[in-house]
Amino acid sequence: MKKALITGINGQDGSFLSELLLEKGYEVYGILRRKSVVDYGNVTHIKDKIHFIYADMTDVVSLIKALNIAQPDEVYNLAAQSFVATSWDQPIATAEIDAVGVTNILEAIRVVNPKCRYYQASTSEMFGKVQAIPQDENTPFYPRSPYGVAKLYGHWITKNYRESFGLFTCSGILFNHEGERRGKEFVTRKITDTVARIKLGLVDHLELGNMDAKRDWGHSKDYVRAMWLMLQQDEPDDYVVATGETRSVRDFAKTAFDKAGIKVEFSGSGVDEIGTDVNSGKVLVRVNPKFFRPAEVEMLVGNPKKAEEKLGWKREISFDQMVERMVATDITLVKQEMRYASQL
């Protein structure tokens, strides 16, 4: 039985990866940060199948202890301060977790078990102000946020430990991947949650920032499969994981409303743009400048050819299916909230 250690196990990707590894017969260990209240997050439904270890990415001693306890064959580093907007408010914390934290766990692996295989969660945000369209493994990086800069350090230190110490380390340059377990602070889940609340009459409109920003959106469940495939190869390497399709934030919102049975059309431009219910004439979407980034990433679209050819990876969940799943799940969750509130 293989053993895997996952940092960030209670997040979206950590939960889907845990399910995948358990299905494949792995013994799964997950790192949690100590809190006053234990929070299993997205792995609550499978917490009895996972071995949890308290550690922190900023504390190399705790990571060494975690590796000694788990003795993993594979380590998946998914832990991060992963919200781009927060990285401007907390740039130092973002750097300590997303950059130095990667060095900490790589050093722990080098000391405890240099034969362990390692996956680093890199990101398309490293491309930032894109230098080529589409972006692939050879496209120059130009990050546009403290998050992107910190992640770029993590990406390069992973490559450095591979080349300097002969460790089996891989980076997955994952483009935006979403799902029904995504945190509500992310724009995609914010959209589907708010659409559900509009559908059920709880709120009257959705506020967004730059609706022209374009992203390459896939489903997390497909992308964690690519993570696993990287660590099953004969040689370590880095891979772009993407759909090869790009859509704007406006497109995502329109699709979400469609899946909820609400037809919206957009008019105006910039801060004056609105989205209107075709049937009722009500304004359902407005622009709020407070959601603009200090430095915007206008367009990301990846070329997954290498991952498809070398890993045999292929996405299985389409954009429409992903949005439909997210909207349906949020409608169900909001209805549950309403039933609970009515019983108080």
Image (spheres, rainbow, N blue to C red):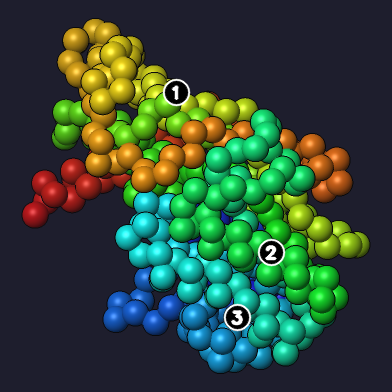
Q: Amino acid at mark 3?
A: Asn
* x then y, percent, for residue 51: 56, 79
Q: Nearer the viewer, mark 3 or mark 2?
A: 2
Q: Residues within 10 Å of mark 3 (few under 14, many from 20)?
A: many
On-image quarter of the N terminus: bottom right
Position of 180 compared to 292: left or right? right
* x then y, percent, for residue 210: 36, 32
Q: Nearer the viewer, mark 3 or mark 1?
A: 3
Q: Residues within 10 Å of mark 1 (few under 14, many from 20)?
A: some
Distance from label 3 to label 1 (Cα)?
40 Å
Distance from label 3 to label 2 (Cα)?
14 Å
Instruction: Kindly identify which numbered label has been placed on residue 156.
Output: 2
Q: Element under label 2? A: helix
Q: In the image shown, does 282 or 305 lie closer to the viewer? A: 305
Q: Amino acid at mark 1?
A: Asp
At horizontal 68% and vertical 69% (from top left) the residue drawn is 157
Query: Can see residue 239?
Result: yes
Q: Element under label 1? A: helix
Name the residue carrying label 3: 104
Q: In the image shown, does 333 or 247 lie closer to the viewer? A: 247
Q: Residues within 10 Å of mark 2 (few under 14, many from 20)?
A: some
Q: Going from the N terminus, do you reach mark 3 or mark 2 first? A: 3
In the image, is residue 64 above or below residue 268? below
Distance from label 1 to label 2 (Cα)?
33 Å
On-image quarter of the C terminus: bottom left
Q: Quadrant of residue 249?
A: top left
Q: Going from the N terminus, do you reach mark 3 or mark 1 first? A: 3
